[in-house]
Image: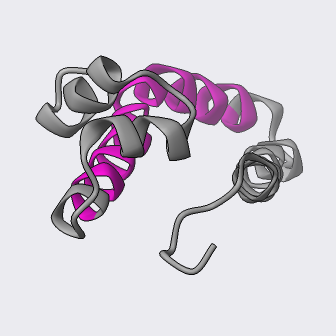
């Protein structure tokens, strides 16, 4: 689309590409030759993973903010990101 928004299929393809890269990075744990180090490293990733979940939320909030700053209202934003207008507003406010 000309205004910079993406169709759902484009968003799915972009998300799949990122998820594949994340999975590939996690598979890097398998290449650690020492089983004890590999297990400890995997444990560290598991322990720290919840904190990493905030990054996609921040990216989504920044994107919604950019759409809003670009002149879109929340019903329009909701339509292009595939949600309802109240959730779009909550994302913008950092509440979701």
**Furthest residue in direction left, as rendered:** 93
Q: Taking 39 as reference, is 77 above or below it?
A: below
Q: Is residue 42 magenta?
A: yes
Question: Overall secondary structure of the magenta stretch?
Answer: helix
**Residue 33: x percent and y percent?**
86, 48
Q: Is residue 3 left or right of residue 75?
A: right
**Residue 66: x percent and y percent?**
26, 64
Q: Is residue 58 left or right of residue 28?
A: left
* Chain part drawn in magenta: 37-66
The image shows a total of numbered marks equal to 0
Quadrant for residue 67, please give it.
bottom left
Residue situated in front as seen by the camera: 38 or 10: 10
Residue situated in front as seen by the camera: 46 or 73: 73
Residue situated in front as seen by the camera: 50 or 9: 9
User: Residue, x 55% and y 22% (percent of image)?
Assistant: 46
User: Residue, x 63% and y 72% (percent of image)?
Assistant: 1
Q: Is residue 14 magenta?
A: no
**Furthest residue in direction bottom, as rendered:** 2
**Residue 69: x percent and y percent?**
16, 65
Q: Is residue 78 left or right of residue 66?
A: right
Q: How is the image coloured?
A: one colour
User: Residue, x 79% and y 45% (percent of image)?
Assistant: 23
Q: Taking 29 as reference, is 65 above or below it?
A: below
Q: Quadrant of the C terminus?
A: top left
User: Residue, x 57% and y 80% (percent of image)?
Assistant: 2
Q: Is residue 13 left or right of residue 66?
A: right
């Amino acid at each position: 689309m000309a205004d910079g928004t993406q169709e759902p299929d484009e968003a799915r393809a972009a998300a799949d590409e990122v998820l594949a890269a994340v999975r590939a990075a996690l598979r890097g744990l398998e290449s650690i030759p020492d089983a004890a180090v590999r297990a400890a490293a995997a444990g560290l990733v598991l322990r720290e993973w919840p904190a990493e979940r905030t990054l996609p939320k921040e990216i989504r909030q920044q994107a919604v903010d950019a759409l809003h700053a670009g002149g879109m209202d929340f019903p329009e934003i909701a339509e292009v990101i595939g949600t309802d207008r109240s959730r779009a507003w909550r994302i913008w406010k950092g509440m979701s």
